[in-house]
Image (spheres, helix red, strand yellow):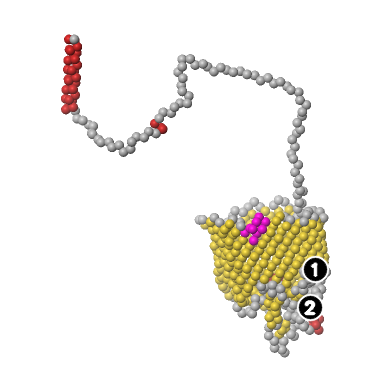
């Protein structure tokens, strides 16, 4: 018991001494820890990352762990007798049509009523994979025989052309040259013409054409293409006309696209031995220089082309010059993919008229024309186009044109007492006037397959003239239909139907003894139906038959010029290779 008291006293003494020493140390040592208040804003929320992931395979710390026993096994093959032998697999047979043999050349000949003859030969030969040469010759003639015509009404049209083309790595080019010979007759005399004077008229006249030109196209170059052509046109009345055209198209790089620009040069010069009323030589000529820049904007379903057409015109005979600027803006927007597309635009142009163009349009013009260009101030249009189905497409458009010096084909007056063969009211001239034209156009095309194609289009016109009483020989309505059918591998057929509405012309007789005034004549509308039927004997030979003006209408395409009645023609076509 005494020992225990001493131990307790000793422990108490040690504790007191330690406390006293700590107090003394606190007096002599500076406290460097500041007191701070901690505010708990958000209670602690443990996350799954704070937990330890439980191991899928815990470690074993057994004193005894059995090792995996190794398994050994063998496969014994036991042969089995068999008499079956599998057949070798073969591809399934597919019925295939024999590919159509394509030929590079053909010749076609036919004869028909009105002692008509039609012949055509087209040739093309590939020298190698880069070069080819070709050409064609065609002839169409008829000996005439129209009922009620008292003058010779035969005609002949013969054409020839040769060409050469070459394809290189970065560009391709071609050149061609051709000639044409045409014979027509001014047989359209006015009603009541004195038949006694017919013997003094030789209505035949001839046109000659020679032209050559070329084209070059570049791949991935600033210059896209270039075109050049020269044409000489003449007749047997010592009239002659030369025309030279050149154009090139380039892409001028910009920051956000290319500025597509076309440069044009057009020279025209010609001579007529006399005018219609005076025996004086008539010369005409001009040259045009044009620049047509255009910039395209593509935005999703919207396409816009912004551009202008600028022309410089110099009249070489009158020594006058003039500048023209026309709009050239077009746009299209896909409302419903390929089904419904709306489009529109406003464009203008300086149209170069020529003796050649008038003679092609109407071969009965007189060699006394007045030639000048047409200033088409603008051609504004808006329309809808698209597909009604995979096989049917449509196009509807409204147009409004304003043309200064618009060329109108008009009948020449009959001049009593004159001796020229075209001065008896049987030829046509050109009248110029400011004309506004409004039209509505519609078109439907059906392309079921290779064996059936159908197209229908129609257009309605109204005209407003400044000086002339009417827009001479311009129809108020035009419509056409074409169809091609392949019945089987041998039989094929086709048809073309044309409807032309009423036109206006003017009849005038100039008689020194009788005062008379011009009289407006209405040319009746007409319908012309043509059809053909053919049979392919083999890949190379086929025969055909054609019928023109099936309705046998004696309509007048031009005033006093009645056409041939129903016409039949039969012939054959041969395809071949060299």
Q: Which residue is rendered at x = 74% and y = 35% of the image?
A: 89
Q: Residue at x 61, y 56 (%)?
A: 338
**Does the segment drawn in magenta span residue 390?**
yes
Q: Are marks 2 and 1 in contact (CB under 8 Å)?
A: no
Q: Nearer the viewer, residue 492 or 249?
A: 492
Question: How packed is label 1: few (under 14 Cα within 10 Å), some, or many (20 or more)?
Answer: some
Quarter of the figure with residue 435: bottom right
Q: State which quarter of the image contains the N terminus.
A: top left
Magenta stretch, overall SS:
strand
Secondary structure of the residue carrying numbered label 1: strand
Position of 145 relative to 80 (above/below): below
Locate residue 450, reporting x and y percent. Answer: 72, 55
> What segment carries the magenta color?
386-394
Residue 311 shows up from this direction: no
Q: Quadrant of residue 208?
A: bottom right
Q: Is residue 542 left or right of residue 285?
A: right
Q: According to the image, label 1 marks what residue?
A: 567
Report the residue marked by disc 2. Answer: 202
Residue occupying the point 16% across, 27% down = 27
> At 69% across and 52% down in the image, what residue appears?
130
138 in the magenta segment:
no
Q: Nearer the viewer, mark 2 or mark 1?
A: 1
**How busy is the neighbourhood of tag 2: few (under 14 within 10 Å), some, or many (20 plus)?**
some
Residue at the far bottom in the pictured view: 513
Front residue of 142/207: it is 142
Number of disc labels: 2
* Picture coordinates of residue 526, whole percent (x, y): 73, 72
* Residue extending farthest top: 2
| Left or right, 453 with reference to 46 | right
Q: Residue 284 in the image: state x and y as whole percent.
A: 65, 75
Q: Is residue 436 visible?
A: yes
Mark 2 or 1, nearer chain start? 2
């Amino acid at each position: 018991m005494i020992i225990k008291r001493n131990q307790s006293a000793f422990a108490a003494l040690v504790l007191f001494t330690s406390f006293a020493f700590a107090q003394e140390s606190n007096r002599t040592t500076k406290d460097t820890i500041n007191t701070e208040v901690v505010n708990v804003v958000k209670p602690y929320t443990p996350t799954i990352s704070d937990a330890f992931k439980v191991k899928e395979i815990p470690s074993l710390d057994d004193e005894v762990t059995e090792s995996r026993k190794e398994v050994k096994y063998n496969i014994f093959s036991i042969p089995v007798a068999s008499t079956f032998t599998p057949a070798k697999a073969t591809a399934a047979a597919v019925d295939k049509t024999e590919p159509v043999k394509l030929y590079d050349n053909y010749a076609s000949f036919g004869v028909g009523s009105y002692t008509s003859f039609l012949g055509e030969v087209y040739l093309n030969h590939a020298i190698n994979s880069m070069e080819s040469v070709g050409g064609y010759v065609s002839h169409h003639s008829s000996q005439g025989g129209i009922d009620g015509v008292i003058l010779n009404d035969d005609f002949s049209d013969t054409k020839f052309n040769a060409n050469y083309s070459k394809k290189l790595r970065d560009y391709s080019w071609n050149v061609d040259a051709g000639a044409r010979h045409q014979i027509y007759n001014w047989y359209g005399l006015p009603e009541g013409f004195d038949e006694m004077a017919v013997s003094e008229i030789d209505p035949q006249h001839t046109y000659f054409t020679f032209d050559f030109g070329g084209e070059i196209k570049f791949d991935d170059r600033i210059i896209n293409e270039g075109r050049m052509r020269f044409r000489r046109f003449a007749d047997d009345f010592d009239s002659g006309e030369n025309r030279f055209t050149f154009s090139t198209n380039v892409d001028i790089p910009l920051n956000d696209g290319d500025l597509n620009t076309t440069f044009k040069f057009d020279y025209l010069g010609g001579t007529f031995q006399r005018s219609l009323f005076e025996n004086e030589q008539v010369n005409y000529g001009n040259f045009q220089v044009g620049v047509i820049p255009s910039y395209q904007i593509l935005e999703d379903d919207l396409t816009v082309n912004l551009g202008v057409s600028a022309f410089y015109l110099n009249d070489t005979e009158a020594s006058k010059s003039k500048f023209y600027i026309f709009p050239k803006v077009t746009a299209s927007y896909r409302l419903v993919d390929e089904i419904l597309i709306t489009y529109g635009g406003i464009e203008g142009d300086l149209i170069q008229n020529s003796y050649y163009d008038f003679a092609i349009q109407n071969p009965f013009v007189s060699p006394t024309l007045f030639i000048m260009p047409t200033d088409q101030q603008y051609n504004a249009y808006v329309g809808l186009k698209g597909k009604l189905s995979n096989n049917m497409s449509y196009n509807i458009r409204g147009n409004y044109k304003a043309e200064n010096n618009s060329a109108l084909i008009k009948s020449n007056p009959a001049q009593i007492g004159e001796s020229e063969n075209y001065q008896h009211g049987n030829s046509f001239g050109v009248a110029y006037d400011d004309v506004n034209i409004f039209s509505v156009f519609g078109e439907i095309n059906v392309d079921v397959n290779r064996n059936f194609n159908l197209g229908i289009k129609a257009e309605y016109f109204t005209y407003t003239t400044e000086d002339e009483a009417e827009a001479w020989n311009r129809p108020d309505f035009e419509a056409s239909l074409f169809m091609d059918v392949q019945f089987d591998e041998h039989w094929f057929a086709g048809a073309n139907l044309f409807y032309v509405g009423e036109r206006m012309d003017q009849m005038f007789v100039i008689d020194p003894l009788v005062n008379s005034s011009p009289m407006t004549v209405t040319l009746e509308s007409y319908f012309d139906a043509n059809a053909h039927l053919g049979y392919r004997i083999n890949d190379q030979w086929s025969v055909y038959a054609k019928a023109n003006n099936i309705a046998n209408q004696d309509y007048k395409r031009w005033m006093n010029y009645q056409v041939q009645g129903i016409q039949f023609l039969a012939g054959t076509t041969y395809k071949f290779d060299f």
